[in-house]
Image (tube, rainbow, N blue to C red):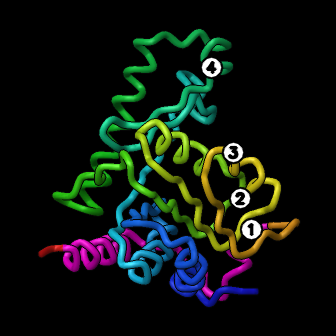
Amino acid sequence: MVFRDRRDAGRQLAVRLHALDLPQPLVLALPRGGVPVGYEVAQALGAPLDLLMVRKLPAPGFPELALGAVTDGNPPGRVINEDVRHELGVSDAEIGRILAGQLTEIARRRAIYAPGHSLPIIRDRSVILVDDGIATGATMRVALQSLQASGARRRIIAVPVAPPEVVTALEPLCDEAVVLMQPHVLGAVGRFYEDFTQTEDAEVIDLLRRTHREAEP
C-alpha cells in the first residue's frame, strides 16, 4: 500500500476510526506533517481539530542531547529523562529555565498557526493523536504521556505507517493504536507516499483556519 499524499492517508485512517464509535472525539495533530492527515480525520468524524506541539528540552551544554520534552496545554505536559538529569547534575532551576524557553517557543508557534485559539480542554475527552507516520516513536511517546497527565479519557494513536516494534512499545501508553501499515523495514516514512512534499506553515494555517471557521456557531 502506498498513499497518494497525507490527505489520502487521513481519509483511509478515518474509515478505520469510524468503527471505534468514539463519543465526541478530539483530533490532535502533531505539526507539521500530521495536520493534513488530521484534517481529513476530523472532517470525516465531524470532530474538532487542533495541534499538540512537542518540543525537546536540550541538555545544558549538550543541545543535541534530550533532557526531556514538553508539550503545550493547560497545564503543559512534561517528561524529564532522570538518567540524563542526574548524569549532568541539572538543577530544578535549570530545568525551569529550559522549560520556560521551550514553552515560549510553543506559544509563539501556536500564535502563528492558530491565533486566538488555545489548546482545547483534554480532561475526560477521547483524543485521537495523529501524525503522518512514526519512525522512532519518541515524539509520540511524549505526546501520549502528556495526554495521560492531562486526564484524557481515551488516548488513540492514528497513523498511516509505523514499524511493528514501535507500535508494540507505544501500546501500553494508549487505549487503541490504529496503524494502516506496519512494515518490518521502515526505511523512511516518505517512501510510503507518492507525494511526501514537506508540509509548509501556510498549509497548516489554512487547514486550521478552515476547521476553526467551520466550528464557529
Q: Comparing marks 3 and 2, which lies closer to the viewer?
A: 3
**Is disc 3 surrounded by few (<14), some (14 to 19) or many (20+) residues within 10 Å?**
few
Tag on residue 82? 4
Q: Which quarter shows the N terminus? A: bottom right
Q: Can residue 55 be spotted in the picture?
A: no
Q: Are marks 2 and 1 in contact (CB under 8 Å)?
A: yes
Q: Quadrant location of the C terminus?
A: bottom left
- Which residue, given by chain and number where applicable, does mark 2 sit on? 135
Above or below, 46 against 169 in this view is below
Mark 4 neighbour class, 10 Å CA radius: few under 14, some 14 to 19, many 20 or more: few
Q: Residues within 10 Å of mark 2 (few under 14, many from 20)?
A: some
- Contact between marks 2 and 4 (CB within 8 A): the answer is no
Q: Spot the residue most to the left.
A: 217
Q: Position of residue 200 (x, y in %)?
A: 42, 72
Q: Secondary structure at mark 4?
A: helix
Which numbered tag is attached to residue 188? 1
- Vertical position of residue 87 compared to residue 175: above or below: above
> Label 3, label 4: how many angstroms apart (C-alpha)?
20 Å
